[in-house]
Amino acid sequence: MSLPVVTPEDVRRDLIARREIALLDLREEDPFAKAHPLFASQLPLSRLEIEILDRVPRQDAKVVLYDNGEGLVAPAGERLAALGYTNVHALDGGLGGWTAAGYELFQDVNSYSKAFGELVEARRHTPSLPAQEVQARIDAKADQVILDSRRFEEYAVMNIPGGISTPGAELVLRARELAPDPSTTIIVNCAGRTRSLIGAQSLVNAGLPNPIFALRNGTIGWTLAEQTLEHGQSRKFPEVREQTLSEARSRARDVAYRAGVRRLDAQGLADLAQDAHRTLYRFDVRTPEEFAAGHLPGFRSAPGGQLVQETDVFAPVRGGRIVLADDLGPRADMTASWLAQLGWEVYVLDGGFEGALETGAWTPRLPVLPPIETLSPRDLVQALADDAVVVIDVAPSPRHRKGHVPGAWFAIRAQLPEALAALPKDKAIVLTSPDGALAALAASELEELTDRPVRVLAGGTDAWIAAGRAVEPGLTRTANAPTDVYKRPYEGTDNAAEAMQAYLDWEFGLVDQLARDATHGFYVI
């Protein structure tokens, strides 16, 4: 299908004017991380239908698609039209057109949140300590607490010795519980720079009386200093007493007020939801465990620290509205204060948790899946024993590495034509994915590419595991290169020193890139 074309200049004008626009990069994560516009959101063709309904919830919002000549835009346009999206455009010239117009290209993922973190440090001179000095303080048993502002899952992989998992939105709420003595030094760390800078500055903005520092360059800096990390720890923040909660509420509310955050009640939220001409995101910024125990209908789980770090993932429609919910208050206020400075129209919902709540983890909205023949886990066991089928797993490569149906091949859905050439010939094909949804979408496309019988594992790999079947770890049979995931230099324990240093050098240059780009509209209180 032929999409209407918009120029890079058109996109830039929309961004500067704060008109709603979702600039979507259809490539896989690795090529996206090498070069993209500041406010581009990566939403690969491979996963388009299973992510778009939540990430771009208003179907007449302006959507601009681009690739780098891979031919992804036309099929994406067709899929979005089938889902009811009515305002979809192609970027003239794709990524090359953006470059030819003389506009900035950014690297890595979550680029605009990271650039904002660097701007905050440059404007506010957020206090920080180098790894060597923090290690010396640990050795001297100094009066200090080290708060790790990443997700708990990241913390559990590796952490600064003695560090306590306190994800970003929890810091102002929990810090005084962990350091009630005003003379106790508080050090905030993450893996690189952004979440430690934003976390430390949150405590400074909230006026905590303690000495406060970010760990300069996070666990990357710690590793480059050849210092030892802990692994497999489970220390978590404590519950808060009423006095601590009252103090945190007052401090966080003041920060939100200074940032220009607006507040509304349930009726005000209902009024916003009635505005059919504006995109509305509703996020619950508490922990995933609290969300699962009981949350407001229509709200998505988005722990506040990660929402600030990954705003491009949670809310691709730049210029939309955001409403935050938190039964205690400080987490929503602090998160909102940062989103406002990032240029968002953001509101905090007062109350709302007194009524009926929904329970369970957040699950994405899915389109109607195409009809496709399925195979039960039991039948697949027999088919594999008979050597009658080949299994294609279109799960994300990290999930495939963790565990897949034994003998399965990894493939990327958007690259199935190339994958077919690598597979064993003359066997029926069984597709799987974690819950089977992505496999069902891929199967209908694969049927048009081959005469071989195509089936889907009923319930996906999750059903295979639930049936008590064994899984195989690793990434040993690849029909496509695993470009669906960018290797982050700040996650995991096997990163090369050169890659970690290059990442830090990139972050140091972001403030200058923001100035050259000149579309961001950020401000720092």
Image (tube, rainbow, N blue to C red):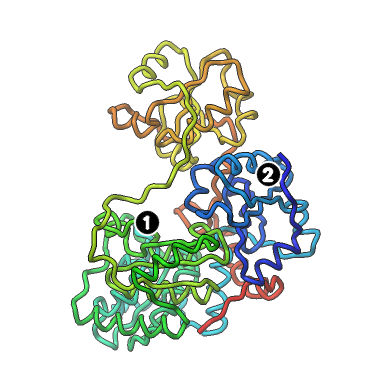
- Location of mark 1 (residue): 298
Numbered disc in front, either 1 or 2: 1
Which residue in the protein does label 2 denote?
Answer: 73
User: From where the camera sits, is residue 147 visible?
Assistant: no
Label 1 – label 2 distance at C-alpha: 30 Å
The answer, for residue 349, to whether it is visible in the render is: yes
Question: Outermost residue, right direction?
Answer: 100
The quadrant where residue 200 appears = bottom left
The location of residue 485, given as percent across then percent down, is 54, 47
Horizontal side of 9 relative to 115 (left or right) equals right
Secondary structure found at label 1? loop
- Circle 2 SS class: helix
- Mark before the other along the chain sequence, 1 or 2: 2
Of 201 and 46, nearer the camera is 46
Split into 4 quadrants, where in the image is the N terminus?
A: top right
**Which residue is farthest top?**
386
Residue located 37% across and 76% down the image: 187
Residues 413 and 182: in front is: 413
Q: Is residue 504 above or below residue 288?
A: below
Tag 1: amino acid: Gly
